[in-house]
Amino acid sequence: MAPNREICAFFYEDKGQGDYRCQLRGTSRKQQVGSGYSNLLSHLTSTHPDFEETYRASVATDAPLSSFGFVSEATQHRYQWL
């Protein structure tokens, strides 16, 4: 299993100051800075029980994240030049 940091970076958009947006549902979540990822992971396990399978499947393919439908246009443009 991947580290919690990687899983949360994959499924959440960091809005700054402890605010995160779930890429799957679009809901906002709060997480205190420096307290780990327990609240974010709790949301994934309670509302997206298949999140581990989704993560593994997407990491195993070379398809861009935009093909999964939850990468914002701004993020896609920001990293497209890389």
Image (cartoon, rainbow, N blue to C red):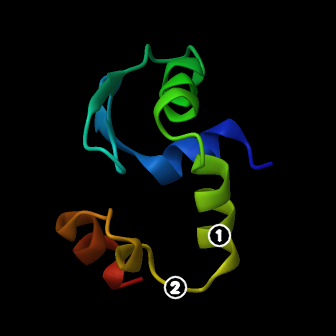
Residue at position x 42%, y 18% in the image: 31
Count of numbered tags: 2
Quadrant in the picture for the C terminus = bottom left
Determine the image quadrant of residue 25. Answer: top left
The type of residue carrying mark 2 is: Ala
Q: Nearer the viewer, residue 8 or 46?
A: 46
- Return the x and y of residue 23 as percentages of the image width and height: 35, 50
* Mark nearer the N terminus (2 vs 1): 1
Give the residue drawn at x 32%, y 62%.
70
**At which x and y percent is residue 74?**
19, 66
Distance from the alpha carbon under mark 2 to that under mark 1: 10 Å
Across and down, in percent, residue 49 comes to 58, 40
Kindly state the secondary structure of the residue where label 2 is placed: loop
Q: Amino acid at mark 1?
A: Ala
Residue 59, above or below 26 = below
Nearest the camera: 43 or 64?
43
Residue at the image point whose x is 50% and y is 41% from the top: 48
Q: Can you tell which of label 2 and label 1 is closer to the viewer?
A: 1
Q: 61 or 80: nearer the eye?
A: 61
Q: In the rendered image, which residue does mark 2 sit on?
A: 63
Relative to 43, 21 lies left or right = left
Q: Which of these two is toward me, 29 or 14?
A: 29
Relative horizontal placement of residue 54, taking residue 69 as reference (left or right): right
Left/right placement of residue 19 relative to residue 59 reads: left
Residue at (43% x, 73% y) in the render? 65
Please name the residue that numbered disc 1 is placed on: 57
Above or below 64: residue 36: above
Question: Which structural element holds mark 1?
Answer: helix
Residue extending furthest right?
A: 1
